[in-house]
Image: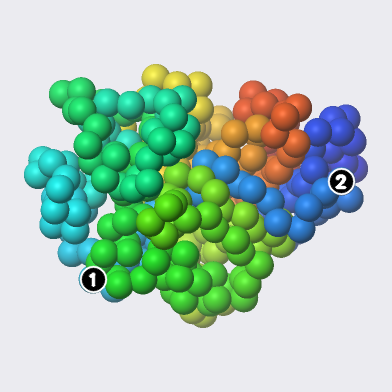
Amino acid sequence: MSEAILRLYEQNDSIQNLYVSVSNKEIFNSQQKSVSKLINIRSMTKSIVSLLIGIAFKEEYIKSLETPINYYLPDAPGHIGIRDLLTMSSGFDIDDKNLYGLVLNSKDWVKSILDLPLSGERDFRYKGVDYHLLSAIISKSTGLKMSSFAHIKFFSKLGINDVEWENDPQGVTVGSTGLKISFESLIKISKLLINNGFDYNNEIISNDWIKTSVENRISTNLSYGDYGYGWWLKSYRGNEIYRALGSGGQQILIYPMEKISVIITADTKTFTHLESEDLSNKILDIITS
């Protein structure tokens, strides 16, 4: 099995790191082509933010996912709830491709986001602005920058200390991207997910939150799958899998039924989501055949 996965790994020089485990047993772990200790996981950041919302919810910093976001951000529209941000269905009229222009010209990203027009539609629309507002809400509700909250309540509990996370001009931790972390730390997070939020006997993330987050919450009409709370959802041979995805083929895949985890990081300039999905599907085929 490991030899077949090794052949897949060696076929594409763009793949930097690859990890595969089954039932907490490491099947493959190759980091020979890693070019940096810390990896920019890009939009996989959103999945980490979802886990942090789960912690804030469990500890009652956030009372309800239905709470209007203007409870924390007074200038926000009153009809948008936290759940709408988690499913990227807030209605703010911007596409993610236009996010760079917004942040480039803004000294206060949260204010600029809240000043955006509303489309009137509440369907899924991929846009990082919703997750940046989630970061601001974590900060407002806990009194801590999201990066500090993450360190105290999440990373340190897993023995993760090798983290860098970008801030906006006002010091708000970037919610949609910008998290840099080691591959070893991504493995720790994948183990936590496979073990339903537990690190040995310590519950770090509520199992109820993980289950809630990876339920199909909204249709996307995108090839990545449908969306939960920060996780992309698909099926493999009729069974559910969920994934954290970042541009350039960055991926954490969790197959709960078979307790399989796959982590892929790659050169974002030469690797694609489609290549990453093809690779992970071939790995699943090898394991489950």
- The image quadrant of residue 49 is bottom left
Label 1 to label 2: alpha-carbon separation: 43 Å
**Which numbered circle lies on residue 115?**
none
Q: Quadrant of the N terminus?
A: top right
The secondary element bearing badge 2 is classed as loop
Position above or below: 243 against 220: below
Q: Residue at x 46, y 25 (%)?
A: 97
Residue 234 appears left or right of 131: right
**Residue under pointer 1:** 60
**Label 1 crowd (10 A; few <14 / some 14-19 / many >=20):** few
- Between 247 and 224, which is closer to the camera in this rendering? 247
Residue 104 appears left or right of 112: right
The secondary element bearing badge 1 is classed as loop
Name the spot of residue 114 as percent of width and height, x first: 23, 41
Residue type marked 1:
Glu
Name the spot of residue 169 as percent of width and height, x first: 43, 52
**Residue under pointer 2:** 33
